[in-house]
Amino acid sequence: MAYRHIEVRANETGFGAEIKGLDLSAPLAAQTLEEVKRAWAEHGVVWFPDQPLELEALERFTEEIGPFGHDPFIKPMADHPHVLELRREPDEKATNFGAGWHSDWSFQETPPAATLLHSKVVPPKGGDTLYADCTRAYEALSPAMKELLAPLNAVHSAILPYSKKGIFAQEKEKRTMQIITSDEAEKTQAHPLVRTHPVTGRKALYVSPVYTVGIEGMSNEESQWLLGGLYQHMTKPEFIYRHKWRENMLVMWDNRSTLHFAEGGYDGYLRVMHRTTVAGEKPL
Ligand code: SIN
């Protein structure tokens, strides 16, 4: 179906699209908003250039997409409980936040449908965000592999990054972002390994090296063997979109059909982003 109220320029693969002709600092008309949501579901990642948004405008647009999600383990901005500031100072040596393939908070019972990331300060080099298309990665599998994966549930947990013995708890270098490690991170949550998108009806692989800790009914060795193969497949160049930031860009991605990875590579430069999430449904 064509778009009548927005200008959508999709990448050749269909994964990732730029949306132009909008001013997100003001509320969108109902039909415009409906088309934005359709483009987001269809293309997985959408970006809106030239949007110098105040925090209040980012919050308001997020709520137009849907109710805020719950963002654990990271201290939000003062007076803005639903906004995280992803800030890395020029002298920071700690690994940049988000430097591993993941779908946001997939260890929750109802993980966020959308994440919105707004660029405030963009370094002159590095700092790209990579997105993996988990729908086309699933569709490219053989019928035999699809049949093997169909009944499986993957187990998700925040233990690796956010537990008291996790990566953030162990790091030695100073970090500007305030990460709150917790025993809560050890909880687990099972989700279908292949989930069906509630809007498009398309199936997607729903596992990631950061948050998936195993597969129900399989030994650890078997789980890691199968998951490792899936990660290699999902992150093949043909499924990746590399996003290059400019200041005042808003990117909105669909956590139900994508993974993302913050690449880093900007030591010596400031990078500041503001991030919100939109609540999602139980993966089916
Ligand atoms: C993230 O949300 O995982 C970080 C993305 C980024 O900073 O590019």
Image: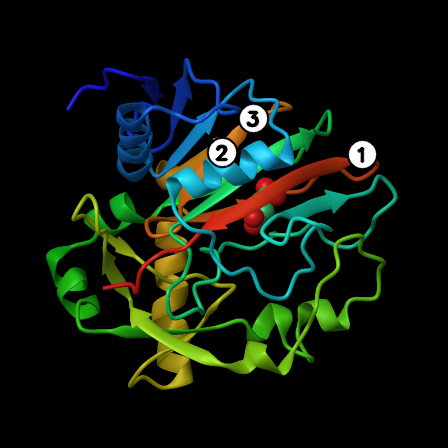
Alpha carbon distance from label 1 to label 2: 21 Å
Res. 128 in view: no
Of the two numbered discs 1 and 3 in the rendering, the one whose residue sits closer to the viewer: 3
Query: Within 8 Å of ligand 1, the CB of disc 3?
Result: no
> Foreground residue, 8 or 22?
22
Where residue 68 sits in the image (x, y, percent)?
47, 52
Residue annotated with mark 1: 269
Residue at the (67%, 42%) spot, across then down: 264
Where residue 215 sits in the image (x, y, percent)?
34, 77
Alpha carbon distance from label 1 to label 3: 18 Å
Q: Amino acid at mark 1?
A: Tyr
Q: Are marks 3 and 2 in contact (CB under 8 Å)?
A: yes
Label 1 residue SS: loop
Is the C terminus in the top left, top right, bottom left or bottom right quadrant?
bottom left
Residue at the (40%, 38%) spot, across then down: 64
Q: Amino acid at mark 3?
A: Met
Residue at the (63%, 71%) spot, across then down: 162
> Which color scheme is applied?
rainbow
Residue at the (38%, 46%) spot, across then down: 66
Label located before the other in sequence (1 or 3):
3
Label of residue 251 in the image: 2
Of the two numbered discs 1 and 2 in the rendering, the one whose residue sits closer to the viewer: 2
> Foreground residue, 83 or 118?
83
Alpha carbon distance from label 3 to label 2: 6 Å
Q: Amino acid at mark 2?
A: Val
Label of residue 249 in the image: 3
